[in-house]
Image (cartoon, helix red, strand yellow):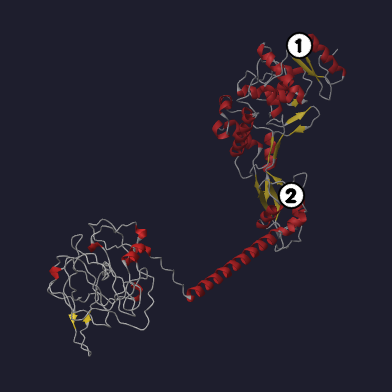
Amino acid sequence: MRDGESDDPSTESGGEPAVTDERRRTRHRDQGRRAEGMDPERLRYFTQPAEGTPHTRHRRRRSAQAPGTTGPIPGLTPVTPPGQRATPVRIPPGGQIPQQPRTRPVPPAADGQTEARTTPRASRPAEPQPPQPAEPHASRPAERQSPPRRPVPPREDRPVAEAETDTDFIVERRPAPAPDRRVDDPRDADDFRDVEVPEPSSAQPRRLRAARTDTEVRALHDPGEDDGWWPGVDDVEEPAAPRRPRRRSREKQKQRRAVVAVAVVFMLALVGGIGYFGLKTLGVFDSRKDYTNAAGTSDVIVDIPDNSTLADFGRILVDADVVGSVRAFVDAADGRPISGGIYKLRTQIPASTAVEMLTDESATHRVGRVVVPPGLQLDSKTGIDGKVTPGIFQRIQDATTVDVNGRSEGVTVTQLEEAAANSTPEELGVPSWAKEAVESMTGDHRRIEGLIAPATWERVEPQDSPVQILHDMIAKSATMFESWGLLDKNNSGLQPYETLVAASIVEREVRHEEDAPKVARVIRNRLDRDQKLEMDSTQNYTADVTNIDVHGDAYKADTEWNTYRYKGLPPTPIASVGMPALEAMLDPAPGRWLYFVTVDTAGTTRFADTFEEHKRNREEACDNKLVSTGCR
């Protein structure tokens, strides 16, 4: 029976249950008997607290020496008297007791007890020592003689804090050994033994806290390594997360309120912005300023892009000081469609006057708008009825000539003829497939005949030079011809430029579109038979007066365009070529026709394979008084 133990193995002197070997085995069954067979010095142990005080588990410190050793114990001091807190000491078998103690003695207390003062450790926390089995009961035979107890030297460690305790194990509380008991020779010890150190007693034992720091838990690995782990250390529950201070909660609430306030302000700004721009789009905030003087103050040229809305018109006119406000112009237009283009207007006029000038059917106020119908030639022509048909050059002059506050702008017919006759094909924008033919006729303005496609040219700038105007129109026309299939859908058997020349004859000869492929076949058949074309349209190209009834000297005119005199195609196209005529020449209708004639003013055309049949068809034209030459 050990000192301070009762005869009853189930209880301690303090009345608490003793920790028996059976209870220890039950407590550590989850460790899979990892500690069985281990060297006793590898095990940890618990201190046996004095009655009324909580026990404390200590771990053995990791030694800086070789693995498996704990290092020398610096010294021994008398066992701490009751009421003083002490720590366990491990003495390895055969260990050497150092001569210099690690604690400083202090003067005896008033009660004659000697107090061991500990010094705080600067580095690692104290290691718990392995627990020893309880002293066998008196009724059980002792296996071997236990070595005498040794005084416990003071530890160089801070007092064990309450947070370092553990309630995972319940150990026996035993009375402290006699203070005068000592170990005579530490070398006689053959095993680790528990050294019970009394702790201050109290009426009620303190409740031990379950929390434990991370440094108190170590893993168990090979017996050769001294890592300070003992079975059961993993049975500790994780400490509960501490409650957050209420101050943080208040700060979170303030932050939430601030975020909500910012979100509300943002939403209000967004809704307000959308509403403002929506109302602005509807013209709620627009000015309704309008001028009253219909005569205006000065001339101004305004260029309005195609597909512009009425609001776009209004903004451009406001910027040019034509109208007073966008809203006034939109109200005056009242949804009427207006075409984009270049206009000559007056500044500071009423919005209603501006709308009238923009929508005038005669296009009096339009500038730079050139309309080129199919079959139109470069030069103006006078018909048998005395009516003059303005040519392309004349129309360009009329569209670009404008007087702006006493200053004249635009180009003339003479300037255009000079540019067409003497400028290089590159300067004129002539495509590659027509370049050779154009160069061969340098000096003659008619060399660009047929290279301007029929279209409505909305923006021929008055301030541009004649060369620039012709370049823009020819280059864009070449793109149009190619898009109609001149290069990749040509089944006429002719070169692209020759096809354009033949198509110009179709354009001038046909009044109904359905007759165009047949006329193209007649041209193609005559060329194949090396027969003169003998087309009235080619002879009229150079005539001073155009006449469908060609007679007299017209048949004898010595020009390259007179197909009554020369075989083959004329040197240039004889008019502007539209898409139907070009497509008809690209793919002529199948047939053996060699002749055709228009027999009435409605444009009815008769086709014939033989000359006899053609003469009968011509008699019909004579009967209808459409022609008189060659009639009976």
Q: Which residue is most to the right?
A: 623
Relative depth, front residue between 464 and 290: 290
Quarter where residue 216 is shown: bottom left
Task: Check disc 2 and report its element: helix, strand or loop.
Answer: helix
Which quarter of the figure is the C terminus placed in? top right
Query: Which residue shows up at 73% across the image and 25% down it?
Result: 508
| Front-most of residues 24 and 465 | 24
Task: Using the image, determine if residue 485 lies above or below residue 154.
Answer: above
Q: Residue furthest bottom?
A: 110
Q: Quadrant of the N terminus?
A: bottom left
Identify the residue shown where x is 71% and y is 31%.
376
Q: Give residue 400's quadrant in the image.
A: top right
Residue under label 1 = 609
Q: Is residue 149 above or below residue 509?
A: below
Residue 136: x and y in percent read: 26, 69
Q: Amino acid at mark 1?
A: Asp
Q: Are marks 1 and 2 in contact (CB under 8 Å)?
A: no
Question: In x, y percent, where is residue 204?
Answer: 38, 81
Check disc 2 and give the amino acid type.
Leu
Q: Position of residue 623 (x, y in %)?
A: 87, 17
Q: Residues within 10 Å of mark 1 (few under 14, many from 20)?
A: some
Q: Residue at x 67, y 49 (%)?
A: 304
* Residue 48 in which image quadrant: bottom left
- Image x and y of residue 466, in percent: 61, 38
Comparing marks 1 and 2, which lies closer to the viewer?
1
Residue sitting at 73 percent across and 34 percent down? 390
- Determine which residue is flagged by label 2: 358
At mark 1, the secondary structure is loop
Whole-angstrom CA distance, mark 1 to mark 2, is 54 Å
Q: Is residue 194 left or right of residue 572?
A: left
